[in-house]
Amino acid sequence: MLRHGGNQTKMTQMFRDWQERDAKRFTQYAAIPYHMLQFIDFTLPRQHILLEMRETFRVPESLCQSRLEQIERKYAEKLCIHRINEVRTWTASLCIYGNHGPISKLRQEVKEKHSRSIKKCF
């Protein structure tokens, strides 16, 4: 599969750098495909995960390390998005239910805590 073409001596340094990063990223995906990660036990300590990846895919540990970091970033990103959506849902429910019941008490607590933290800034 040809992903890059052209004469690199006639390309800008920025474009050559991009091609290098793209080639490294492609190597990670090709050498350790996502659908094969189901065979790795991610509940183990990090060093054991790296060892298992290295033995399963027969690749250098540095490649396993970078792929694992990539997986961790992706997982953290999804977790962060999930938390943001939870906060948005919670905030929307505060707006919908207004000043009734436990929601209004919770809203008041949040306002008080927020106003105290703002006062500390001044």
Image (cartoon, rainbow, N blue to C red):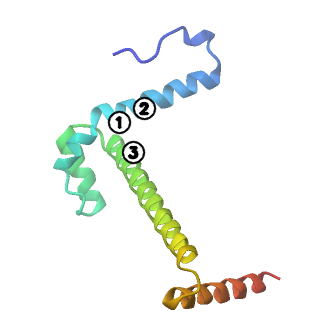
Specify the quadrant of the image occupied by residue 121.
bottom right
User: Residue beneath label 1, please?
Assistant: 28
For the residues labelled 3 and 2, the Cα–Cα distance comes to 10 Å
Residue found at x 23% / y 51%: 51
User: Residue beneath label 3, please?
Assistant: 66
Q: Position of residue 103 (x, y in %)?
A: 52, 85
User: Residue beneath label 2, please?
Assistant: 24
Three-letter code for the amino acid on which mark 1 is drawn: Gln
Nearer the N terminus, badge 3 or badge 1? 1
Q: Residue furthest right?
A: 122
Nearer the N terminus, badge 3 or badge 2? 2
Q: Are marks 1 and 2 in contact (CB under 8 Å)?
A: yes
Q: Position of residue 53 (x, y in %)?
A: 23, 46
Q: Are marks 3 and 2 in contact (CB under 8 Å)?
A: yes
The quadrant of the picture occupied by the C terminus is bottom right
Q: Are marks 3 and 1 in contact (CB under 8 Å)?
A: yes
